[in-house]
Image (cartoon, coloured by chain):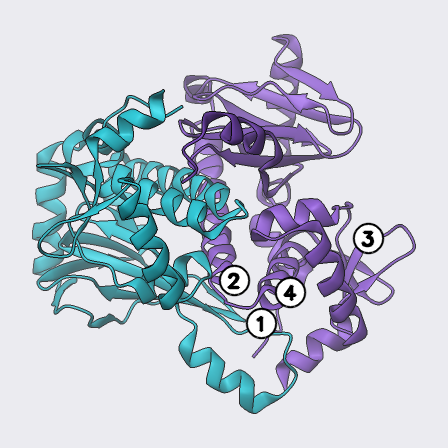
Chain colours: A purple, B cyan
Amino acid sequence: MYSVTSPSELHVESNLESSRPFLTWQRIIDWAQEHYRCRTFTKDERIPARSGLLYLVQRGAVRLVGSAQVTATNSGTVRATRQLQEEAFLGFVGAGQPFEIVAQSPFTLQSYAHVDQTTVIWLYWHDLDNWPHFRREVLDAFRYQHQRKLLWLSTLGQRRTIDQLLGFLTLLIEEFGEPCESGYCLPWSLTHAQIGSAIGSTRVTVTRLMGKLRQKGLIRTDGDNLICLPADAILKHHQ
Amino acid sequence: MYSVTSPSELHVESNLESSRPFLTWQRIIDWAQEHYRCRTFTKDERIPARSGLLYLVQRGAVRLVGSAQVTATNSGTVRATRQLQEEAFLGFVGAGQPFEIVAQSPFTLQSYAHVDQTTVIWLYWHDLDNWPHFRREVLDAFRYQHQRKLLWLSTLGQRRTIDQLLGFLTLLIEEFGEPCESGYCLPWSLTHAQIGSAIGSTRVTVTRLMGKLRQKGLIRTDGDNLICLPADAILKHHQ
């Protein structure tokens, strides 16, 4: 049932850098530097992104998180406490990819540098008037990100948490994975709490289910605690 | 914490029809009819959409569903049975809005007419070469849909199912709701099984939690079993 498309092939479709004429991208980087429109962040530093602007990841990786202040609990105090805890991991934005932050109360989106030395460029949408072809690329990138989120929602619609977890990891590694000894590996670490927040589960449950998936040989973790999909697990799905 | 933006104001941002020059839209409808590129479906009829094409909802509403064939269960038989059951509701596409179907094994997306007399136009992307301004609108619409999905994922990241449920209903009604006596009402019915599939829960749990939300006055259901957000519940969130 599993696609034969390797993560690296998929990557080509999503990776703006590979399809983008190198000159445009270089020109935008130069322009951003000239106009003080880029900044470098350290790991887990919050990127002060505002709604209505467009951001491009020049280097590194950005982590999007969202929090929902809708709750069926009426008590204000309880709500305030829970808000602080419930930041959901919404995905990565890799180098060459755009992102934006939506401000839609009662929901808040935020962006963090996921790795050290993450450089982000920011633009107004009308800045792209100079590069109409590039604007189309940015919009196509959002279209692609939208498609990935529909797949993500499909896996969250599964009833069993272990299936949600495996589907979630598969999607992430398909999109961002890099070839490694045992298959494909997510190049960045992700805590069990972050994974839990993405699938609406807890750190404890994720730790337990990751153990199960490892036992079944469906995932592996390498020395640096990075998550891998073993090549033979991918083959298993084909049968 | 709740936004003062009313659902109808939000709607303006998302509703292509209102911002689109009427003539372009009419020209596309005429073109589609001339070229046999539109078809009308009955309620719950499957729309045979293919990956790589672009679809526009001319009238009615489309329901997107997804299924994930990733499962941690090794047995082939069990997996096959479960596949049939697990179609996750991924959202509505209203009149004037575009959609597309991604084929990305092991995930499958499908589209259904959600109401009777739903008319859908289909195009190749290069057909839009004739209407470059319209292509930009379509891409902007996908960008908007992507933003909504990020909010949707934010609410699914909440731990308690009742919060996920309320967040999910709030997002749907914010986007598609119509003013009614008691607040804002989702104009289409949605079964508890469909809601359950969207938030990774079961019909039984949704029925129980909908009862709780009604008791707390956070939602209402009108005569036709349509779900409403009462105006005073919205006010409550502001406090």
Amino acid type at mark 2 = Thr
State if disc 1 and disc 4 touch (CB < 8 Å).
Answer: yes
Whole-percent x, y for residue B79 in the image: 54, 83
Badge 4 element: helix
Q: Which of marks 4 and 3 is nearer the N terminus?
A: 4
Q: Which of marks 4 and 2 is nearer the N terminus?
A: 2
Marks 1/3: CA–CA distance: 21 Å
Q: Quadrant of the C terminus of chain B?
A: top left
Check disc 3: other Cα within 10 Å, few if <14, some if 14-19, many if 20+. some
The subunit letter for the residue under badge 2 reads A
Amino acid type at mark 4 = Leu
Badge 2 element: helix
Check disc 2: other Cα within 10 Å, few if <14, some if 14-19, many if 20+. many
Which residue carries the number 2 mark? A155
Answer above or below: position of A171 versus B170. Answer: below
Seen from the viewer's position, the closer of residues A226 and A80 is A80
Answer above or below: position of B25 versus B221. Answer: above
Marks 4/1: CA–CA distance: 7 Å
Tell me which residue sits at (59%, 48%) in the image.
Answer: A198
Q: Can you see residue A230?
A: no
Both marks 4 and 2 on one chain = yes
Whole-percent x, y for residue B64 in the image: 32, 60
The subunit letter for the residue under badge 3 reads A
Marks 1/2: CA–CA distance: 8 Å
Seen in the image, is A183 located left or right of residue B115?
right
Label disc, if present, on residue A166 of the rendered structure: 4
Amino acid type at mark 1 = Val
The subunit letter for the residue under badge 1 reads B
Which residue carries the number 3 mark? A226
Badge 1 element: loop
Amino acid type at mark 3 = Leu
Tell me which residue sits at (21%, 26%) in the image.
Answer: B9
